[in-house]
Image (tube, helix red, strand yellow):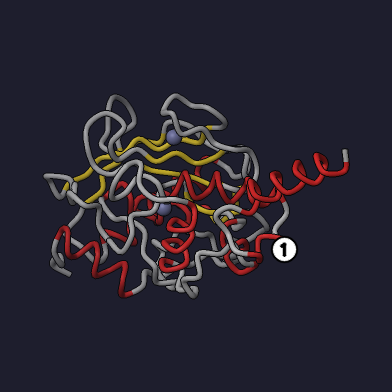
């Protein structure tokens, strides 16, 4: 009886510990599941769809975020995993997507389909315009708002499952996501309406910062591993009404579209 109980206990330990070294004991089972879900979501798609085990995925995450590549779920790795972030999966070491999708014209249209109740509509309109202006100031791109019909970048606040197989997850976690340039969903930017959105003057997720990040994806930029870049995947606490692109952001947009005239 004692023997079989021991077997069960050691089998259970094996399941939980594999493939990680003894440090796993510091991470509880719930955190392990959170990490597994995160890694499968953000480190499974590129470059090959079904490659690699957890340890490799942990190393990829650690490399991207500049941690030492131990392959172990240590506390600093868990800290990154539990930060609010953009829902777009990681593309390792690319500032652009592998096949560099971009808009064929420098005139890109956008439409705001729905709003949040956290800010007045005019404020959302202003911040969307300001977010696009970040990118147009350093490139030849011109953004034109349309009020009806289709637009290149359809922007909306939405919650939970919303028809693109990338459901939102309630408050925290994923804040928003956007699609690279293309037809249909291509270019569209979705913001999780279960977040508390802010214009930077009160508590909440800074909408200008998040929108500038998501529109970067809408224009063809992938995530940057530079913590100063707007295109860094995790959300920084940002209580300001202003925002600046980093050199890395500017280089990436100019690689795609050129420098512009100003
Ligand atoms: Zn992102
Ligand atoms: Zn979506």
Q: Identify which residue, 108 or 173, lies in the foreground.
A: 173
How far across and down, in percent of the image, does residue 21 sit? 60, 64
Mark 1 packing: few (<14 Cα in 10 Å), some, or many (20+)? few
Residue at (23%, 62%) from the top-left corner?
A: 253
Ligand 2's quadrant is top left
Left or right of residue 17, residue 63 in this image: left
Measured along the vertical axis of the image, is residue 183 above or below residue 108? above
Left or right of residue 178, residue 22 in this image: right
How far across and down, in percent of the image, does residue 131 sit? 39, 55
Q: Identify which residue, 224 or 139, lies in the foreground.
A: 224
Residue at (13%, 67%) from the top-left corner?
A: 261
Q: Identify which residue, 171 or 92, lies in the foreground.
A: 92
How far across and down, in percent of the image, does residue 170 sit? 63, 38
Residue 6 visible to an observer of this rendering = yes
Quadrant holding the C terminus: bottom left
Left or right of residue 31, residue 153 in this image: left
Quadrant holding the N terminus: top right
Measured along the vertical axis of the image, is residue 252 above or below residue 40? below
Measured along the vertical axis of the image, is residue 259 above or below residue 14? below
Q: Secondary structure at mark 1?
A: helix
Q: How many marks?
A: 1
How far across and down, in percent of the image, does residue 4 sit? 80, 39
Residue at (39%, 50%) from the top-left corner?
A: 52
Quadrant of res 181: top left
Task: Write down the residue under mark 1.
Answer: 26
Residue 196 visible to an observer of this rendering = no
Residue at (40%, 56%) from the top-left corner?
A: 213
Q: Answer yes or no: disc 1 within 8 Å of ligand 1.
A: no
Left or right of residue 49, residue 98 in this image: left
């Amino acid at each position: 009886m004692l023997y079989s109980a021991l077997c069960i206990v050691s089998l259970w330990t094996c399941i939980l510990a594999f493939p990680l070294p003894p440090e796993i004991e510091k991470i509880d089972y719930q955190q392990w599941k959170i990490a597994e879900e995160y890694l499968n979501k953000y480190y499974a798609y590129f470059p090959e769809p079904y490659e690699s085990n957890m340890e490799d995925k942990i190393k990829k995450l650690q490399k991207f975020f500049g941690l030492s590549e131990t392959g172990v779920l240590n506390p600093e790795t868990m800290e990154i995993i539990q930060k609010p972030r953009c829902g777009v999966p990681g593309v390792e070491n690319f500032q652009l997507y592998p096949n560099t999708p971009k808009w064929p014209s420098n005139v890109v249209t956008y439409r705001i389909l729905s709003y949040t109740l956290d800010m007045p509509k005019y404020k959302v309109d202003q911040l969307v315009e300001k977010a696009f202006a970040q990118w147009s100031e350093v490139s030849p791109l011109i953004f034109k708002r349309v009020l009806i019909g289709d637009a290149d970048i359809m922007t909306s606040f939405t919650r939970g499952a919303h028809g693109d197989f990338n459901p939102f997850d309630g408050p925290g976690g994923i804040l928003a996501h956007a699609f690279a340039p293309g037809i249909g969903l291509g270019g569209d930017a979705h913001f999780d309406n279960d977040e508390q959105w802010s214009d930077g003057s009160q508590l909440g997720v800074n909408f200008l910062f998040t929108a500038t990040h998501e529109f970067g994806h809408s224009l063809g930029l992938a995530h940057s591993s530079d913590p100063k870049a707007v295109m860094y995947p995790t959300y920084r606490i940002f209580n300001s009404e202003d925002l600046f692109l980093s050199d890395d952001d500017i280089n990436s947009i100019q690689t795609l579209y050129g420098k512009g005239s100003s």
